[in-house]
Amino acid sequence: MVSFVFNGGGLWSTLLVALKRRRFNVDQPMVALTAAIYAYCGAIILASIVNNSIARDAAHLVPLITFLFFPFSYSVWSISQKTTLARIIILSSMAACFGALLLTGIQYYWLGMLRVEGAAGNPIVFATVVCLSVMVCMAGALSGIERNRSLLVCAALAGTIAILYTGSRIMWLAMLIAGIAVLLIHRQNLRSRNARRLLLVSGAVGLAIAALGFHIILDRAEFLRSDWDALMAHGEHNTALGFRVAMWQIGVDAFREMPFFGHGVGATSRLIKQGFHDQFGMDKGFSHFHNGFLTVLVEAGILGAVALAAIFVVAARNAAKVLRISADPIERFGATMIVIVVITYLIGGMVGILVGHDILDSVLMIFLVSGTYLASGRTLPITEEQTLPVTPAA
């Protein structure tokens, strides 16, 4: 649903700009980010052309449309009042956290799922989106944009519980690091008595949640230790960790074969299946290498990996510039959104998907569009004002 809404809106935004019913907003931060995004898309397409597989890869190239919509969505979203957009983002994230807790309760206690996955079909993907929502609620409570701080804290804690029940260890780490970043960005706002009291209450409740979910944390840690022992002592790859190590080895070998332009976006599944069969004598298949940059290195080579890294580098640079010179709460909130999405995606992408999943791609664009606009964008008028002639009748 998220992908449908964002891509449908992106298509409509493109038509509005093309028909000149909306102006194309040319902000320097947006232009730099657009250049990086389009370079990544170009590298992926070039890899398919070099491998003479453009027709075979056509279906795999369709998701790039989500990225290509970025400047057009940005231009149309620029008619929004920044304060209104920021409140919409905060309240929507609050609703997402409570909704995540509801899904968690249904899936874990009613359906008996050991690792909840929301409606994403994947615990890590679900945890990634919820982590972003939790961090936005934290930023909203600390920035002072939304007055009902207690409800935002409750929403953040609800989302934290949902992330705990996903069993996604990498997202636990991402949530911790992103949370520290949010606190550091808004540390000036923590000096008030109410903010300190709210932080102490949140910490106490967070510790209570960790205590209640200690068995989940302990079980996931034991799984990791068991997988590590099996891999090191017996070379056992038929575990979650073993599968990842095997895929990383297959991916590195595939990258060495074609380091500059890669094998093309459609070759990943075939390379993984063939690698498991030839190197490990296993009949296994996956759609990606469970490392975002390794996946793009195999698919589009060094050129693609550099372009993908540039997206996050440019976004982080835009955010850092705003945080360094601006004291405006809306601008700092937008920059915080960028910091949150960069940290969460890069950490999650180390052992999972970085880009290439429909909801992750759409949410990444939503955060980059709205974060960049709130941080450093200029608001455009909805329609061009017409100057009336000065006459006695007028």
Image: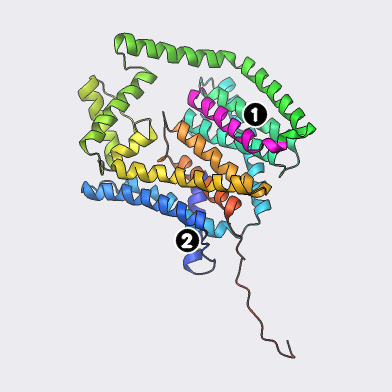
Residue 107 percent across, percent down from the top left? 55, 25
In the rendered image, residue 89, in percent from the top left (x then y), is placed at: 63, 45
N-terminal of the two: label 2 or label 1? 2
- Report which quarter residue 257 is drawn in: top left
- Reply yes or no: does residue 145 show up in magenta: no
Q: Quadrant of the C terminus?
A: bottom right
| 172 in the magenta segment | yes
Q: Which mark is residue 14?
A: 2
Residue type highlighted by circle 1:
Ala
Instruction: Find residue 184 and report its horizontal and vertical position in percent.
Output: 62, 34
Name the spot of residue 178 as percent of width and height, x first.
56, 33
**Location of residue 394 with respect to 365 vertically, above or below:** below
> Considering depth in this image, is 377 or 245 the residue closer to the camera?
377
Determine the residue positioned at 74% across, 91% down: 392
> Toward the viewer: 182 or 368?
182
Against 105, is 184 above or below? below
Specify the farthest residue to the front.
325
SS at circle 1: helix
Residues rendered magenta in the picture: 167-189
- Residue 158: mark: 1
